[in-house]
Structure formats: structure tokens, C-alpha cells
Image: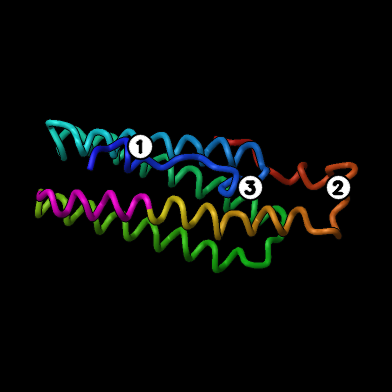
Amino acid sequence: MNAETQHIHWTASLSTELQSVDEQHQKIIESANTALDALQGDDGLAAAIPHIETLIAETRAHFAHEEQLMRNIAFPAYPEHKVQHDRLLEEITDYMLELDLEQSAEELQVLINFLKFWVVRHMSQSDTQIRDFILRPEHDLQTNAWKNHIPEAP
């Protein structure tokens, strides 16, 4: 299976309708695809590690931004969402340790599948809940006053 067939593609179902969050999500997808390409290349793991490290750093920065947003808007599911973020970062770290130890094609494929799964699932299921909370009828959508609570992207 080539890397292009494994790429993650941005779709409307991933959109939170929050520009800074969506831009970060698109950047994370782009970085994940770059890592996938590197994993499938001739140099495999050695070429992919810098891209995976970039992806992890971007993800950490994005999670910090998103968590600030959730606190600013008093998002009721913030504690659970924060736990998801922490768990995802722990799992990525565990996969990276396994890759360091195993350095096998099987471990590479496990990481590829995991990246695809968590990126798409988390964005489409968990992050869209933030959008739904902000866009609920109680908010004044005419003035977009809720946008004042969105932190600037890092």
C-alpha cells in the first residue's frame, strides 16, 4: 500500500468552524501525511522520526491552544477532553518507544494506523463538540461575541 492511499484528507466533517482550530488541524494532517510519506520511503523510520517529532510538537501546541479555548468558553466537557489529549500524547510516546526498540515494518504500520485513527476520530468526534457548544442557540450568533474567547493560535 503506498503512502498516498494512506493519506488523511481534510473534509468538512472535520471542521470545527473555528478558523484557528481548523488551521491547526489542517497543519497536523499535513504533518501526519508527511510522516506517512517518510515512513513509506526508502529510508523508512530514520527519515520519518524528525517528521513524527514535528507532528508531536505541533499536536502538543494545538492541544494547549484548544484547552485554553475550552477554558475560556467554560466548555463543560473540558475535563474529559483534556484527558483525551493527555491519553493521546501518552500513546504516541509509547509508540515512539516501541519504534525505538523494534524498528520493524510491523511497528511502522502500527504507528501509521494509529496516527490515522486518532487524528480523524478525535477531530471528527471530540473537537466538533466544541463547535456544537459554541454554536448552540443560547449564544448570540448575530454579534459573534463568543469569538472574543478564542485565543490566538501559537
Among the two numbered marks 3 and 2 on one chain, the one whose residue lies closer to the N terminus? 3
Please name the amino acid that badge 3 sits on: Thr
Q: What number is the disc on residue 141?
A: 2
Residues tagged 3 and 1 counted as in contact (Cβ below 8 A): no
Please name the amino acid that badge 2 sits on: Leu
Q: Residue at x 20, y 37 (%)?
A: 40
Q: How many marks?
A: 3
Q: Quadrant of residue 37?
A: top left
Q: Residue at x 35, y 37 (%)?
A: 33
Q: Split into 4 quadrants, where in the image is the N terminus?
A: top left
Q: Is residue 31 left or right of residue 80?
A: left
Residues tagged 1 and 2 counted as in contact (Cβ below 8 A): no
Q: What number is the disc on residue 33?
A: 1
In the rendered image, residue 104, in percent from the top left (x then y), is placed at 10, 50
Q: Is residue 87 above or below residue 142?
A: below
Density class for disc 1 (Cα within 10 Å; few <14, some 14-19, many ≥20) is: many
Say if the magenta span includes residue 113: yes
Residues tagged 3 and 2 counted as in contact (Cβ below 8 A): no
Q: What number is the disc on residue 16?
A: 3
Q: Quadrant of residue 133?
A: bottom right
Q: Is residue 100 left or right of residue 26?
A: left
Among the two numbered marks 1 and 2 on one chain, the one whose residue lies closer to the N terminus? 1
Identify the element where label 3 is drawn: loop
Q: What number is the disc on residue 95?
A: none
Q: Name the dominant secondary structure of the magenta segment.
A: helix
Q: Nearer the viewer, residue 136 or 70?
A: 136
Q: Is residue 82 left or right of residue 115?
A: right
Among the two numbered marks 3 and 1 on one chain, the one whose residue lies closer to the N terminus? 3
Q: Split into 4 quadrants, where in the image is the C terminus?
A: top right
Q: CA distance from mark 3 to mark 2?
A: 15 Å
Q: CA distance from mark 1 to mark 2?
A: 35 Å
